[in-house]
Image: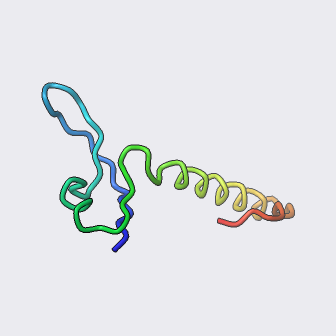
Amino acid sequence: ATVIDVGINRIERDGKNKLVGDVDFASAVEVAGAITPVPGGVGPMTIACLLANTLTAACRANGLPEPEGLTA
């Protein structure tokens, strides 16, 4: 199975804050064929898709042509 962890949580471990996902990475990595890390996983793609959707919405709201090749 492929695990795409899109969750992000801040926990305290050893007196320091740490970002972790919703998936127990240490357990899942043993059985998953592929797994995305947190941080450093799907965040940049999520931001790119949100930006593309925002641009598309702005173009549509203002009667402007949508940029070619932009798919979200």
Could you say which quadrant of the image residue 35 lies in?
bottom left
Q: Nearer the viewer, residue 42 or 57?
A: 42
Q: Nearer the viewer, residue 16 or 2?
A: 2
In the rendered image, the quadrant that contains the C terminus is bottom right
Describe the colour scheme in one phrase: rainbow
Q: Is residue 52 left or right of residue 25?
A: right
Which residue corresponds to the image point at 67% horizontal and 57% vertical from the top-left?
A: 52
In the rendered image, the quadrant that contains the N terminus is bottom left
Which residue corresponds to the image point at 26% horizontal and 40% vertical from the top-left?
A: 10
Residue 42 is situated, as x and y percent measured from the top left of the image, at 47, 54
Q: Which residue occupies the extreme bottom position in the image?
A: 1
Residue 29 is situated, as x and y percent measured from the top left of the image, at 26, 59
2 w.r.t. 37: above or below? below
Which residue corresponds to the image point at 43% horizontal and 45% vertical from the top-left?
A: 40
Residue 56 is situated, as x and y percent measured from the top left of the image, at 72, 61
Q: Is residue 23 left or right of residue 34?
A: left
Q: Which residue occupies the extreme left position in the image?
A: 14
Residue 71 is situated, as x and y percent measured from the top left of the image, at 70, 66
Q: Is residue 45 left or right of residue 24?
A: right
